Amino acid sequence: MAIINRQLAEIFKDISRLLEIKGEKQAFRIQAYKKAAVFLENLGQDVSDIYKEKKLKGLEALPKIGKGMAQKIEEYLQKGKIKYYDELQNETAIRQLITCFFETKGLGLAALKQSARAQKIIYSRYTKPAKQLLELAGSMEKAKRAIKTVAGWALSRNLDYSIETIFKKWLELDQLKPKEIVKKPFYDNMPMMWSENKKKWYVISPSGEWLEFADKEEKIEWRIAQ
């Protein structure tokens, strides 16, 4: 796939997602960008070559690419950016951060909207801290990275966290690391130990006796240590 095709496909995918976050009521608009992205990903010809040869009409003639999208492709080829995309990013900035925060908690966009409608989540409660986080971080990318860093650190320790936790941990972000996942071997629900001297596995019985492991190694079950 041509690099320019991939770049445009990613932009159109992101536009469709931002429209969903924004709450676009006309679902066909969202689907149109998704279909255009898939088309560009599978287009065997570099879209910039098509434009060089046939200009805007060549882009408009492509399947899944309407007049409006063709104009956006032309704008990207000429200027390296799409004004509508930039405006949409700015318009949905706070909602993007709130969505990102809940995604780290395992709640997707559809579930988030449903919970907000049912007032299980008071959406307005998160707008102010999300705005403050964006101002503190200075960019959407840094703000999202901060959310994911704190989430990884907290989730690996079974700790709850809020957007405010990010403010509290702001000066420690570079040091916050997820807890190392340690897995320990078990056989038939009994812990095991490896003897480096004898090069053998042993099963520790409930009474504490070390029993030489005689089964196949694929029968060893590795569990995350609590």
Image (spheres, rainbow, N blue to C red):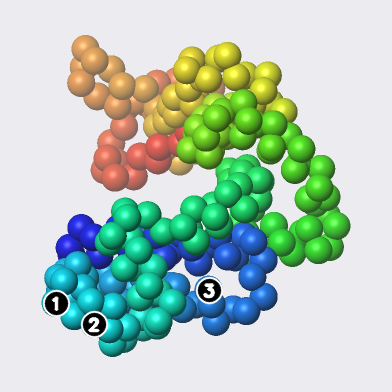
Residue 160 in the image: state x and y as whole percent: 69, 32
As measured in the structure, the alpha-carbon distance from the residue carrying label 2 to the one carrying label 1 is 8 Å
**Identity, as a three-letter code, of the amino acid under mark 2:** Gly
For the residues bearing labels 2 and 1, Cβ distance under 8 angstroms: yes
Query: Which comes before the other along the chain, label 3 or label 2?
Result: 3
Foreground: 207 or 167? 167
Foreground: 91 or 18? 91
Q: Is residue 107 above or below residue 171?
A: below
Residue 84 in the image: state x and y as whole percent: 50, 61
As measured in the structure, the alpha-carbon distance from the residue carrying label 3 to the one carrying label 2 is 23 Å
* Residue that mark 3 sits on: 30
Query: Which comes before the other along the chain, label 2 or label 1?
Result: 1
* Residue that mark 1 sits on: 53
**Identity, as a three-letter code, of the amino acid under mark 1:** Glu
Foreground: 116 or 142? 142
On-image quarter of the C terminus: top right
Q: Residues within 10 Å of mark 3 (few under 14, many from 20)?
A: some
* Image mark count: 3
Q: Is residue 150 above or below residue 79?
A: above
Q: Is residue 214 left or right of residue 142?
A: left
* Residue that mark 2 sits on: 58
